[in-house]
């Protein structure tokens, strides 16, 4: 005997939660399923706890760069106190999330969801059915073809460290590695990043990435490019990481080796074949309305879906809104990924929205590129914020902003203004005539254009 619902959502992160609560409020009988604590990666094991740690790292950087300019003593990080503070944000989430579901009239299930048919699944041996099932299971660390990969520590484990090791090696040069490396280095660790290719953070503008790399080196992070990790060995008191470089095999010694090699869609154990759901290593195949191309009862959103969107929380939330409208009203809404901003919360921060210079040229646009070092502008010079730079890609024909790329302490907030302009098709000349509060970072926007 099965329990029948209108909507079942698998995954309780921000994307899945928004769908479930919205459907329940509209009178749909709704259920949520999660095999882990309710709340999802971002609030519990990703964005939010990472930002707590990164913000403290920023404060340390601010006091260091203002030595002799009004600040006498640099700040330092007490790791145990910081982790306790971080847990004050993460620990309340699962209970609060479950209470919000129950308040909305949503039935909650803890366990692993496994499909048994196109509209049915089991959780804890209980059979559930629904006309609409939304898969929002997120992503997991990508398996790395490395001998001794069992010795890797993962990002969520790093966020729970009671003690910060003296020597840390990050395998891979993506978001996780750079954000955590900047935190660890400013907390006193000797940090190495091992990057297989010749540029880390490959989705970002290379000129901005180069500036971040130089700053990373200044604070004691060693970056090894064109280095392919082959094996990790554990000795009594340390790990040995072996990598191939042009000059031959090299070895690195560390007390902790962290997986920073990217993530893949979490489709394991769902048994999607039984639901006639097409998927690949890139995720569940969906159309522009985020509906499964092979099973029209199924939707997929967030990191588990194979879309044009980046693996970002705001992307998942946007997709959740699209799916909610399509389930409730059959509107056929489509997901749009134009101009969605992305930020690396290192210090300085690295931010991007829209097309890179290379992408714009390859797309055939006649472009104007405003590439400026802005570290001597008052916004940055009065707090000794270096490096700071901006690259704006403009369409000469329409005056629309095609892309924006920034590095600096204000990049995470500034990028939102450029993202707004890209998404709403606001031409550059209109941004220039706005009267902004001064002196603020945003008041620099007209000069950047």
Image (tube, rainbow, N blue to C red):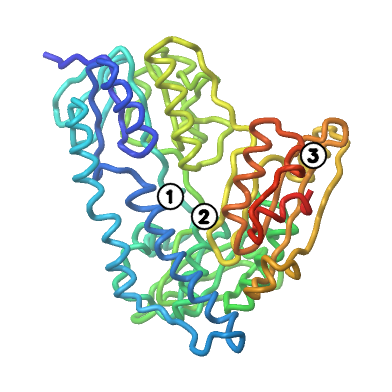
Marker disc for residue 261: 2
Looking at marks 3 and 2 on the same chain, the residue that comes earlier in the sequence is marked by 2
The x, y position of residue 81, in whole percent, is 30, 74
Tell me how far mark 3 sits from mark 2, CA to CA.
Answer: 41 Å
The residue drawn where x is 43% and y is 18% is 325
Looking at marks 3 and 1 on the same chain, the residue that comes earlier in the sequence is marked by 1
Pointer 1 residue: 141
Question: The N terminus appears in which quarter of the rendering?
Answer: top left
| Label 3 crowd (10 A; few <14 / some 14-19 / many >=20) | few
Looking at marks 1 and 2 on the same chain, the residue that comes earlier in the sequence is marked by 1
The x, y position of residue 438, in whole percent, is 66, 58
Marker disc for residue 296: none
Pointer 3 residue: 429
Q: Specify the quadrant of the image occupied by residue 432.
A: top right
The residue drawn where x is 44% and y is 69% is 56
Q: Is residue 245 left or right of residue 357?
A: left
The image shows residue 114, relative to residue 258, as above or below, that is: above
- Are the residues flagged by discs 3 and 1 in contact, CB closer than 8 Å? no
The x, y position of residue 277, in whole percent, is 41, 20
Q: Nearer the viewer, mark 3 or mark 2?
A: 3
The residue drawn where x is 44% and y is 26% is 321
- Are the residues flagged by discs 1 and 2 in contact, CB closer than 8 Å? yes
The x, y position of residue 170, in whole percent, is 50, 66
């Amino acid at each position: 005997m099965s329990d029948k619902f209108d909507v079942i959502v698998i995954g309780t992160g921000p994307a899945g939660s928004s769908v479930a609560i919205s459907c329940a409020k509209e009178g749909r009988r709704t259920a949520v399923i999660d095999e882990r604590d309710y709340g999802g990666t971002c609030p519990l094991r990703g964005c939010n706890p990472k930002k707590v740690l990164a913000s403290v790292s920023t404060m340390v950087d601010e006091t260091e760069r203002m030595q002799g300019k009004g600040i006498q003593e640099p700040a330092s990080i007490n790791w145990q106190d910081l982790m306790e503070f971080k847990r004050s944000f993460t620990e309340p989430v699962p209970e609060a999330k479950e209470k919000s579901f129950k308040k909305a009239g949503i039935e909650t299930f803890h366990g692993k969801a496994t499909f048994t048919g196109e509209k049915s699944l089991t959780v804890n041996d209980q059979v559930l059915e629904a006309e609409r099932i939304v898969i929002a299971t997120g992503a997991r660390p990508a398996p790395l073809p490395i001998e001794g990969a069992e010795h890797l520590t993962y990002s969520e484990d790093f966020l729970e460290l009671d003690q910060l090791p003296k020597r840390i090696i990050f395998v891979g040069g993506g978001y996780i590695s750079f954000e955590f490396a900047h935190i660890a280095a400013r907390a006193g660790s000797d940090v190495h990043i091992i990057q297989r290719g010749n540029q880390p953070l490959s989705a970002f503008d290379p000129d901005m990435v180069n500036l971040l790399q130089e700053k990373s080196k200044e604070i004691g992070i060693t970056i090894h490019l064109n280095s392919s990790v082959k094996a990790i060995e554990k000795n009594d008191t340390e790990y040995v990481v072996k990598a191939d470089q042009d000059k031959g095999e090299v070895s690195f010694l560390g007390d902790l080796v962290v997986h920073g090699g990217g993530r893949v869609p979490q489709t394991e154990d769902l048994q999607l074949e039984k639901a006639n759901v097409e998927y690949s290593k890139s995720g569940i195949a969906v159309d522009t309305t985020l509906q499964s191309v092979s099973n029209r009862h199924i939707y997929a959103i967030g990191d588990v879906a194979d879309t044009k969107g980046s693996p970002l929380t705001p992307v998942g939330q946007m997709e959740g809104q699209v799916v909610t409208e399509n389930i409730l009203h059959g509107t056929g809404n489509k997901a749009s990924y134009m101009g969605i901003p992305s930020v690396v919360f290192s210090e300085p921060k690295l931010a991007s929205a829209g097309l890179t210079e290379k992408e714009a040229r390859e797309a055939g646009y006649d472009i104007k590129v405003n590439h400026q070092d802005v570290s001597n502008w008052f916004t940055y010079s009065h707090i000794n914020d270096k490096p700071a730079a901006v690259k704006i890609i403009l369409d000469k024909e329409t005056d629309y902003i095609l892309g924006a790329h920034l590095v600096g302490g204000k990049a995470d907030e500034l990028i939102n203004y450029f993202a707004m302009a890209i998404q709403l098709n606001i031409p550059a000349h209109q941004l220039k005539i706005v009267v902004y509060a001064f002196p603020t970072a945003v008041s620099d926007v007209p000069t950047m254009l």
